[in-house]
Amino acid sequence: MPAAVEAHQLVKHYSGRGGTVEAVRGVDLEVATGEVFGFLGPNGAGKSTTVKMLTTLMSITSGSARVAGVDVAADPDGARRRIGVALQEAGLDPRQTGRELLVLQARLFGSSTSAAAERAGELLELVDLVEAADRRIKGYSGGMRRRLDLASALVHEPEVLFLDEPTTGLDPASRLTVWDEMRRINGRGTTVFLTTQYLEEADQLCDRLAIIDDGRIVREGTPAELKSELRGRRGLDADPTLDEVFLDATGRTRERSAGDVQEVQA
Amino acid sequence: MNQAVALAQRALREALRTPEALLPTLFIPLFFLVVNVGQVAEIFPSGTSFLEGQNYAAFQLPSSILLAASFGSAALFLVEDIEGGYFDKLRAAPVSRTAIVLGRLAAEAVKSFAITTAMVLVSVPFGVSIASGPLGFVLLLVLTSAWAVVFSGFMQLIALKSRSAAATNSGSLIFFPLLFLTPNFVPRDLLSRPMEIAATFNPVTYIMEGLRSLILDDFEWAPIGRGFVVVAVLGVLMVVLNVRMIRNYD
C-alpha cells in the first residue's frame, strides 16, 4: 500500500517585492495510510504553503509530492479526486444554505443531482447540521461553519483529508466537537493530515507529527518519541510537554514566541 | 458541462439573493436613458433621418442596455469567493477550470437577458419598438448578453489578478471611455473627426451599432454581423485568458 502522503525535497519560492522568499526549503514527509498526522510550526514557518502544494492549490518550485499514490503536479485532478480539503479559512459561500453548498460540492465531484442530494443529507446528519441545513450559511456560528466545511471536504469520501488549523477561533465545546468528528472520520479509514498551532490538539489526536520551522522539518516522530528524545537529551526527570518539545525544536523561548511578529507573504 | 451548469445555478442564486447589487443594474441605466433623452430629444425630433421614423429614446436605448450589461458585479462576487476561501475550495476539487469560468459567465448572460428584456419592455410605452421584429429582439438579447459575458470576463481577469475588491471596482471605470468614446448621442459620421477616430477603434462602437440597427432598421446584416464578430472574438479571448489565469493561480 502506498503512503498516503509523500513529499521529497519540496521547495517553494515566491517572487516578492523584496526579492525571492524561500517559504519551504526542502521538506521530506511520509504519512502512512490511516494515520492522523500532525504538522506543526510557528506562524510563517511554511505549514500552509506545504499544505497548499500537497493539495494542488499552489505550484511546486522543485521536488515532488504524491498523495494517495498520485503525483500532485503531474495529475492534479487525480489527486483532487482522492483528497478532501478544509483550509484555514472555512471556504464557504455565505449566500447559500448548508444543503445547497453540499449538493453543489457533490455535483462538482461528479454525482448526479439526486445522488448529491442524498449524500448532502448523510453529511448533514454526520456533522449534526440537519436543523440548520436550509438556512443561509451567513447565519451559522463559527463552529457550525467549521463542521459544514468539514462535511464539504468529505462529499466524495476522500482517502486523505487535509485540515488546516480546523479549530482556530473555535470555543472549547466546538473544538471538542471537531475533534470527535476527526476521530470518527479517521476511524473509517481516512488518513488525516492536520496542521495546527494547538499543541494539546496534536497531542490528543495525532499518531505522528512533524514540526516545521523556517521552511524545514526540524522534528518528526510520535508525540511520545519526541518527548522522550527531549527528556533524554536534557536529562529531565519527567517527560516534557509537547509545548516544550515545540519550543526546543523551533529554538524559541516562550517570551520570543509570545512576542513574535512575522511577515508572511503568499 | 454539468459542472458549469451547477456553478451557473449557484451564481444565479447568489445574484437573486443580493438584490442590492442587482437592482442598480436596472435602475441606473434607465435613469441615464430618461435623462439623456430628456436633454437631447428636442434637438433630434422623430423626423430626424438617422432615427428611421422612431423617437430619440430608440436611438439611446442601446447605450443604456450596454451600460446595464457592463456592471460586472460577478467579478466582485468572485473577489468575495477568493477572500472567503471558497475559490480555493473550488480549485481543490476536480472541476474543469473552464467550467469555473463558464459557470459565472453563463449566469451573467442569463442576468443580462432578463435585465435587457425588462429595459426594452419599459421603453415600449415611450414609443420605442424593435423594427427587426421578434427575431431581431432575440438577436438583441443575445448580442447584449454576449457583451455582458465579455465585460464580466474582463472584470474577472482584474479580480483574479488583484484579488482585491477595491482594484476590481476601479477596473470597472474602464467602461466610461468604452461607452462614451462611441456614437453614443449621434451616428458615427456626425461625430467630430477625433471622436470618430476614437469610436472606430473602440469595439463597443460595433456592438452599439449592431444593437441600434436591430432597433431602428429592418435587418441590416452588416452592422449586426460586425457586432457579433466583435463579441465572439472578445468572448473567446476573455474565456481563454480567464482559464489560463485560474490554471496559473498560486
Image (cartoon, coloured by chain):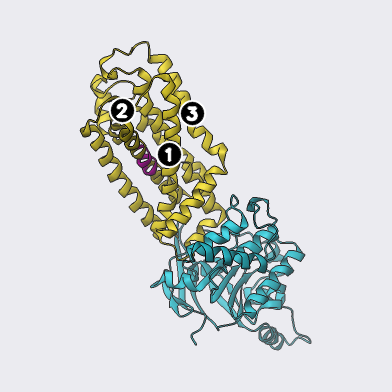
| Chain seen in yellow | B
Residue displayed at 38% across by 73% down? A74
**Residue type of the residue flagged with mark 1:** Ser
Find disc 1 in the rendering and name its residue: B112
Give the alpha-carbon distance from disc 3 to disc 1, as whole Å: 14 Å
Chain of the residue displaying label 1: B
Residue displayed at 31% across by 49% down? B236
Task: Give coordinates of residue A59: x percent, y percent.
Answer: 43, 66
The residue positioned farthest toward the left in the image shown: B222
Find disc 2 in the rendering and name its residue: B212
Q: Earlier in the sequence, mark 3 or mark 1?
A: 3
Find disc 3 in the rendering and name its residue: B28
Which numbered dot is residue A18? none
Which secondary structure, mark 3? helix
- Magenta span: predominant SS is helix
Q: Does B95 sit above or below residue A240?
A: above
The residue positioned farthest toward the right in the image shown: A237
Query: Quadrant of the rendered structure where residue A158 is?
Result: bottom right
Give the alpha-carbon distance from disc 2 to disc 3, as whole Å: 20 Å
